[in-house]
Amino acid sequence: MALLLILGSSPMIEGIPAFFAAGQYGLGLLIIMALVFAAATIATYIVLSVDSAKGLDQFRFGQFEQYGEIVSGMLIAVVGAVFWFWPVT
């Protein structure tokens, strides 16, 4: 559900016709629509981030908590090396 909310709240192709349709009613309505869209997007990200952080507090990752930065750095380096030697065209 959280993934659906994140993907659904991002700028999407379905929203463009609504903004074009509202354009005929003036700049004021476009500004209101943009502000409502921005507020809804930001609120969704904040709520989901806070809930995710609360959920992750319930788990203990043992050694990974101590060496998590090293593991993530190595993963980034491996992905970088793979794409360096095997470029995507």
Image (cartoon, grey):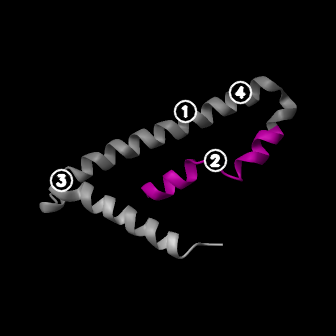
Residue under the point 54% across and 40% down: 41
Q: Earlier in the sequence, mark 1 or mark 2?
A: 2
Q: Which quadrant is the C terminus positioned in? A: bottom right
**Spot occupied by residue 23 in the image (x, y as percentages of width and height):** 83, 34
Q: Earlier in the sequence, mark 3 or mark 2?
A: 2
Residue under label 3? 58
Q: How many angstroms separate mark 1 from mark 2 (CA)?
A: 13 Å
Q: Earlier in the sequence, mark 3 or mark 4?
A: 4
The quadrant in which residue 70 appears is: bottom left
> What SS does tag 4 mark?
helix
Confirm whether the magenta stretch covers residue 24.
no
Residue under the point 67% across and 33% down: 34
Q: Nearer the viewer, mark 4 or mark 2?
A: 2
Q: Earlier in the sequence, mark 3 or mark 1?
A: 1
Q: Say left or right for 34 vs 71.
A: right
Residue situated in front as seen by the camera: 61 or 79? 79
Residue 59 makes an appearance in the image = no
Q: How many angstroms separate mark 3 from mark 2 (CA)?
A: 32 Å
Residue under label 2? 11
- Give the crowd class for mark 2: few <14, some 14-19, many >=20 residues within 10 Å: few
Residue under label 1? 39
